[in-house]
Image (spheres, rainbow, N blue to C red):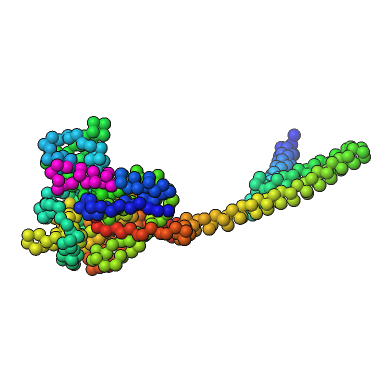
Amino acid sequence: MDPIRKRELKRQAWQRLSAQRRRAGLLRGRVVVISLVCFAFLWGVVFVQMATGNDPVLAPKEAAVRSAAAGARREGQAADAREPEAERRAQRAKARAAEEAGETEPEAEVELVEAEAQAVAPATEEAEPEAEEFVEAEPQVEEVEAEPEPLVTSQS
Amino acid sequence: MSEAVDTFPCFGGRCAVRVGGEGEHEAVAAVREAKRTLLAAHATLSRFDPASELSRLNRDPRETVPASPLLRRVVTGALLAGLRSGGLVDATLVEGIEAAGYTESRDFDAAREATVAAAPHTGAHAAGPSRRAGWCLLAVDEAAGTVSRPPGLRLDPGGIAKGLLADLVGESLSGFESYAVDCCGDLRVGGRSGRARRILVDDPGGGEPLHELRIADGAVATSGITRRAWSDDEGRPAHQILDPATGRPAFTGVVQATAVAPTGLLAETQAKAALLVGPERAAAQLPFGGVIVEEGGAVQVVEAIGAALPEVLAA
């Protein structure tokens, strides 16, 4: 083969190869950037949620129930595409029931919490006067019984 | 609720025991028993009675001497007082007290030479521990029932014995609703009721009480240089609280220190230490609070460390 032709073919091959590498690098870069952005975004969401004090682990039960219900509903919707109409209805009814349960339970729990708070509140209110009594309780007792005469500490 | 009370001469002054409870007979019996205990302790621990166990111990030529449980407790108390005060409270300065002129029992309340020692004293300086540190040489063997010290080292527990006896008697009365033991001004109060008692701090000059404390369970002791005070042969003011470093009556600028503490022994130790370190450092010796009276008559009320805790934590 003509050496000039051979060189030209080599050059074209290099060009193709380098173009292929550029595309691969570009794709790799895009994947990395998108991954990083998604990662940062998800962590940002988690961070904001935790920082605002809405730790789902520490959330009351109704949130878990609600999310479970939502999960069940999502599952039901996903199944809709595959399952026949009857099954879909049954699934919807189940999801609705779960949703209703999820909506009623929290109310009961809130009531329970409120009830507990009410039960605690009077105890706290009662405890405060007791603490005062501990420090200055003596006069109250003294009202009933005469205070003993004071002692005197003097040089021993 | 009624209180059974008895006041009687003891420890060179006046002691009092008060017991309150539902059973009047039990309270009266407890007061009688407490009085017997205190008088027996006085007979055991008197430096001026040659027949007392303390005097016999001080004369004994042996290094290790059998001792009664009470004397062992008192020697242990003297050792603890020396440790807690860094050697300022030294119960082995008998030579110094005798050299200052306190060789026999006196009725200080009748003589009342208080003004002699209370007057501002030139050259007041803080006391320091003794180089000899005789209190370090005391040892108690509870198993053997003995006390050890170098022969010739004499012991005068003084206020330490009063504070300790207030504790011991107080412990025996702790089952009653309320009790108060007064050993010549060293007080121990307590009882199941937890009722706070008013305690007045005496004026070293003989005036109105300087301050009022309220304590439900604990002890108060006062140490000063104006009550057991006299003039020596050369007319110089003298008193019973010695500077361990010099062996002479201490004039530190503080004439009276009152300490509050959980126990009578600790209160007595802290009161004496506060008096000996002088007005600048006296407050630091009173972690549970107290009252300091300086030579010029200035009264410094020291709050307990715990009272300032919220401010410290907030800072």
Asked if residue B270 can be seen in this view, the reply is no
- Residue shown at 68% from the left, 53% from the top: A114
| Residue B255 in the image: above or below residue B45 | below
B132 falls in the magenta region? no
B171 vs B76, nearest the viewer? B171
B254 vs B165, nearest the viewer? B165
Left/right of residue B54 with respect to residue B290 in the rendered view: left
B41 falls in the magenta region? yes
Residues in magenta?
B34-52
Q: Position of residue B69 (x, y in %)?
A: 25, 37
Left/right of residue A100 with respect to residue B221 in the rendered view: right
Q: Quadrant of residue A65?
A: top right
Q: Position of residue A36 (x, y in %)?
A: 66, 47
| Residue A18 in the image: above or below residue B245 | above
Left/right of residue B118 with respect to residue B6 in the rendered view: left
Asked if residue B115 can be seen in this view, the reply is yes
SS majority, magenta: helix
